C-alpha cells in the first residue's frame, strides 16, 4: 500500500470517527440551553457521549456512515486517475476496518458491493488550481438527512414566496418544518440560490464544508443566515424532533448565477453528525484539519 493511500485512509477515519471541534462545541452549548431533564437535553447528552466514545475508540460517530463526497484540489500535471484509484483503495480499506459501513447498493439488483465502491460511488469533484500542493476535503453525508433535502422553484405560490430573499427565507423555513425530526436534528443547512437543478444540490452540499463560525462575505447573505438560524430555532422542533430550543445550529448560503426563467433554492439538510475533514499534502508532508 502506497503512502498516499494510507494518508487517505486516515482522512476517512478522521471524518467518520472524530466530529469536528466546532460542531461538538455548538452541540455542547445547545445542551446547556435546554431544560435539565428534558427530552431535548437527554438527546443532546446521548449524542455528546456518543461523540466522545467514537473519538476514543475510532468507531463511527453514526451507524450510517453516509456517502463519501470528495473534493480534490490539485496542481497542473497531477494525475486525477491515479488520485481516484488511491482514494478508492483507501475507501475500500476503510470499509474493511469498519470506519465506514458498506453503503454502495446497485440500484438495479439491490446488491451491496461490500466495499463502498460502485458506479459513481464515492462522489468525486476534481479541480485544478494554481497552488503547488494537494488539498482533499471529505464530507460523509448521511442518508436520513439526505432524504429530507429539498429544492424549491421561486416563485412558490403555496407559501407566497417570491423571487427575493424573503421568499428564500419562507421556503427554507418550510423545508425545516417539513423535515421535523426525520433528518436527525439538530441540523446544519447548506443552501444554494440559483444555478441549475442538478448543480443547485451540489453547491448546497458545498456550503456544508464551511466552518460554523465563519461570516458570509456577502452582507445580505450573512444577515439572512443569522435570521434563518433564529427563525428555525423558534419552530421548537428540537433535537430529534423532541421539542426544544435547538433545531438548527448552522445555516450556510451561497448564491450562483442562473437562467432568467429559473430561480431554484436547493436545501442540503445535514444531521447533527456534520462529518467533514480535510488534508493537505505539500513536499510529501501530510497535515489534517
Image (cartoon, rainbow, N blue to C red):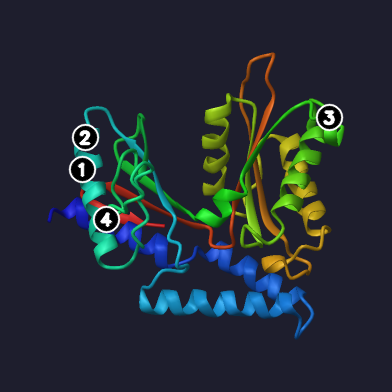
Local crowd at mark 2 within 10 Å, few (<14), some, or many (≥20)? few
Residue that appears at 27% across and 55% down: 115
Local crowd at mark 1 within 10 Å, few (<14), some, or many (≥20)? few
Name the foreground residue: 209 vs 113. 113
- State the separation of the CA atoms marked 3 and 4: 45 Å
Local crowd at mark 4 within 10 Å, few (<14), some, or many (≥20)? some
Please give the residue where the numbered disc 4 appears in the rendered image: 115
Please give the residue where the numbered disc 1 appears in the rendered image: 85
Q: Position of residue 282 (x, y in %)?
A: 27, 46
In terms of sequence position, does the residue under pointer 1 or pointer 4 come before the other? 1
Please report contact status of discs 2 and 1: CB closer than 8 Å, yes or no: yes
Which image quarter is the C terminus in? Answer: bottom left
Label 4: which secondary element: loop
Local crowd at mark 3 within 10 Å, few (<14), some, or many (≥20)? few
Please give the residue where the numbered disc 3 appears in the rendered image: 157
On the question of residue 224 being in view, the answer is yes
Amino acid at each position: 500500500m502506497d503512502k498516499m493511500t494510507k494518508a487517505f485512509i486516515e482522512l476517512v477515519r478522521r471524518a467518520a470517527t472524530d466530529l469536528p471541534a466546532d460542531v461538538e462545541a455548538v452541540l455542547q452549548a445547545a445542551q446547556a440551553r435546554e431544560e435539565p431533564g428534558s427530552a431535548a437535553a437527554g438527546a443532546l447528552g446521548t449524542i455528546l457521549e456518543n461523540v466522545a466514545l467514537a473519538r476514543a475508540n475510532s468507531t463511527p460517530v453514526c451507524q450510517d456512515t453516509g456517502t463519501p463526497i470528495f473534493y480534490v484540489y490539485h496542481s497542473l500535471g497531477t494525475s486525477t486517475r491515479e488520485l481516484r484509484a488511491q482514494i478508492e483503495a483507501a475507501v475500500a480499506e476503510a470499509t474493511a476496518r469498519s470506519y465506514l459501513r458498506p453503503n454502495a447498493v446497485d440500484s438495479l439488483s439491490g446488491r451491496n458491493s461490500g466495499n463502498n465502491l460502485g458506479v459513481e460511488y464515492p462522489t468525486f469533484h476534481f479541480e485544478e488550481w494554481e497552488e503547488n500542493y494537494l488539498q482533499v476535503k471529505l464530507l460523509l453525508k448521511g442518508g436520513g438527512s439526505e432524504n429530507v433535502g429539498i429544492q424549491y422553484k421561486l416563485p412558490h405560490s403555496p407559501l407566497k414566496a417570491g423571487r427575493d430573499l424573503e421568499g428564500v427565507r419562507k421556503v427554507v423555513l418550510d423545508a425545516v418544518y417539513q423535515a421535523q425530526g426525520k433528518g436527525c436534528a439538530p441540523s446544519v443547512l447548506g443552501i444554494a440560490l440559483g444555478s441549475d437543478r442538478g448543480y443547485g444540490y451540489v453547491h448546497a452540499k458545498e456550503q456544508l464544508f464551511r466552518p460554523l463560525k465563519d461570516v458570509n462575505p456577502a452582507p445580505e447573505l450573512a444577515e439572512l443566515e443569522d435570521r434563518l438560524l433564529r427563525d428555525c430555532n423558534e419552530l421548537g422542533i428540537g433535537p430529534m424532533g423532541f421539542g426544544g430550543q435547538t433545531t438548527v445550529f448552522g445555516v450556510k448560503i451561497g448564491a450562483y448565477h442562473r437562467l432568467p426563467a429559473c430561480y431554484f433554492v436547493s436545501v442540503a439538510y445535514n444531521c447533527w453528525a456534520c462529518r467533514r475533514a480535510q488534508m493537505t499534502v505539500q513536499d510529501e508532508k501530510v497535515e489534517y484539519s
